[in-house]
Each structure stands twice: as C-alpha cells, then as structure tokens.
Image (cartoon, grey):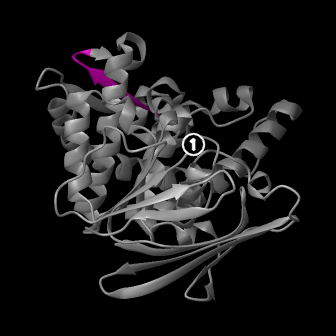
Amino acid sequence: MQLDRLRLQNFRSYAALDLRFNNGTVFITGDNANGKTSILEAIGMLSIGKSFRGTSDSSLTRFQSGDSWFVSGEYTLENQLYKLDVAYQKGHAKRFKVNGKSLSGRQDLIGRLISVIMSPDDLALVNGGPLTRRRFVDLLLSHQSKSYLNALMQYSRIVKQRNQILKQARKDRMQPRNLEYFDKQFISTAENLIAYRVEFLKKFGPILQNKIQAISSQQDQVVCRWDYADEREAESFSESVHKNLNRDVHSGYTTIGPHRHNLLFILNGNNIDEHGSQGQKRSLVLAMRMAEYYFLHMVTGIKPVLLVDDVIRELDQQRRTVFIDMLYDSNQAFFTSPDLDGIQWQSGRQRQVLQVRKEHEISQVHGND
C-alpha cells in the first residue's frame, strides 16, 4: 500500500496544496506551527474519516476561507489505483467517495487506506481513561473487519435506545417497558463484540510482548486483559444483563457491556496505570503502536502506511533502534520533524524530504536515492 498523491483545499492553514509522494520514507520538515502535522492530519482523514488530533470538522476550515474544506488522495494497492475524497460543508455531514462513488458514511471509508498513527499524545493510551483504550482496539479491529465495525455501530444504537427506556423507567419509578425486545439484540450484539475482542487479544498480546521485550532488552513482561464491569460478563453475558437490570433502572443507563470494558496492561505483575514509571509507559505506548502495525500486517496482508508526528526525538537509543526496524519493514512512512539532525536512514531506501515554510509553501529538498 502506498499513498501517491494528496490534495487539500481550505484545510487547516492550506488554501490549496497538491503533493506527490514516493514510497520509502517521506520526511516533512520545518519550524513548528508551519503546517507539518496538518499534512499528516489530512492523510489520517483519508484513513479514519476524522482528525486524529480530536479536532472538530468545523475547526479544520482555513481561517476566513468560507465554511468548507476538501481532502483528496490517491493510493496504490496491489497495482490498482484508488482515489479517496473527503468533503466538509458546514451544516452538512461529511461526504466520502472512493473512485468518484459516494460512500454511505465513515464506516465505509475505514479499512481502505490502512494507517498507523503515532503522535506525542499517545501517552493517553496509558494515562487516559478506558474510553481511549477501547477506541484504540475498536479502530484497529475496524480496519481489519467490516463485520466488527458494523456490529459496533449496531451496538451503539441499541445501547442508546436501551438507555432512553431505562431513563424513562427511572423517571416513572416503574419497570421498563419493551425492554425485552431490545435486550435480545443487546445481548446478541454484545456477545459478538466480546468474542471479537477476546480473539483479538489472543493475537495482539504475543506481538505486544515481543515488542516490549525488544525495547527493554528482555527485561519487561507485559500481559493485556479485559476488565469487565461485572465479573460474570465473560462467562454468561445474558445472565449478567438480567441480574443487573435493577441497577440499570436505578442508574437510568446500561451499566455493563462492551461500552464499559477497560483494557488493562499488567507490566511485570503490576497495573502499569497505577505503578508504571514514565519511561515504562513510554515504552509500552511505543510497543502498542508497533504491535498495531505488525498485527494489521498479519491479519490483512497489507503493510499499513506509517504516520509519525514528531516523536522519534523522544526515543532513547534502544527504543529508536527497535522503532527503526519497523520503519524499514514498512513500504511507506511519513515523518514530521523540525529538521533532520540526528536522523539516519537506511542506505538504498528511498527517501523524500519536503520542507514546509512559514508561508505554507512546500519545496522538495531531496528526492530518491
């Protein structure tokens, strides 16, 4: 998989931009606040249909340039050329197209241009709440399986409807009506998601362990497991739902299920969230992103495009060595960095260096070797 071209209109600080890329490594250099990360953000938009920085669609519009923006990209997969378009207009849902054909929504975009995104905000995967880790797993599995993504969307709709019934029952101080119909769907869909996630950890866990050992020179051991809101969920979700009904009514919302699960990381026998050092957390985050890359390659047969936002300088020599191995394995990687000081690349690997200036002009400093 290789991204060949990127075009922007009124996106972030760019009025218009048209870039063509090589395979290998693409370095995007320039001073801070010049628009380097915006290029990665646009590529990420083509991959996951939203900003990986958590920015709202309206805030991505170029200042004083109207109420719309446009991102387009061309990529090659197995000698086939594909064109993706994402268009935003204020007051309307984003529009997605592939090869000129409209898609029904973001769910049909995900899984096409597969990417792994690394940014300074990744520490939130460890320091943040359960939602952050669930989203990590959900996006990863959605790249792998449309069935999982469809089940996840169906589950979210069911939980929303179920919560409305529970909220009304709490208000009326009576047993909820019509809940039996929703609970059949709720239980079936939840059990499907749980099965996907359990199977995911069976494959992802060993890869993560391999990468954390490589980073720590075989010193650290990591185990990842799901922490359920109710211990009975893993054995009999249906039974757990029925036994928690009164609590759900009292709370006015669904208190158990995949939307309440937490992914725990046990490093050397301790929960890293509570006992891990800052260095151990950084190592785990790097190992997670590397495991994400190798997992997706394993289950899809496709090497994801790497998007690396100014993180290589934060890595010590050991972490950097392991990270570079992943870089050399990839077909294409995009790096942002103020400059190239201290950054080395493999002899014979293609590289492209783009320099972003303050006026948002981009020049190619180096081409292929």
Above-or-below relation of 256 to 328:
above
Q: Circle 1 sits in a helix, a strand or a loop, which is it?
A: loop
| Percent position of residue 357, x then y | 61, 53
Mark 1 crowdedness (10 Å alpha carbons): few <14, some 14-19, many ≥20: some
**Residue displayed at 75% across by 32% down:** 252
> In the depicted view, which residue is nearer to us: 76 or 355?
355
The quadrant in which residue 359 appears is bottom right
Depth check: give the residue in front, 164 or 106: 106
Q: Quadrant of the N terminus?
A: bottom left
Q: Does residue 268 belong to the magenta stretch? A: yes
- Horizontal side of residue 71 vs 126, given as left or right: right
Residue 257 at x, y percent in the picture: 52, 40
Amino acid residing under circle 1: Asp
Q: Which residues are magenta?
A: 261-269
What is the residue that sits farthest to the left in this orientation?
A: 218
- Nearer to me, 210 or 348: 348
Residue underneath mark 1 = 31
Residue 165, position in %: x, y? 77, 45
Q: Quadrant of residue 73?
A: bottom right
Q: Residue at x 10, y 26 (%)?
A: 218
Observer able to see residue 119:
yes
Q: Is residue 176 visible?
A: no
275 over 68 or under it: above or below: above
Q: Nearer the viewer, residue 73 or 23?
A: 23
In this view, the residue farthest toward the top is 275
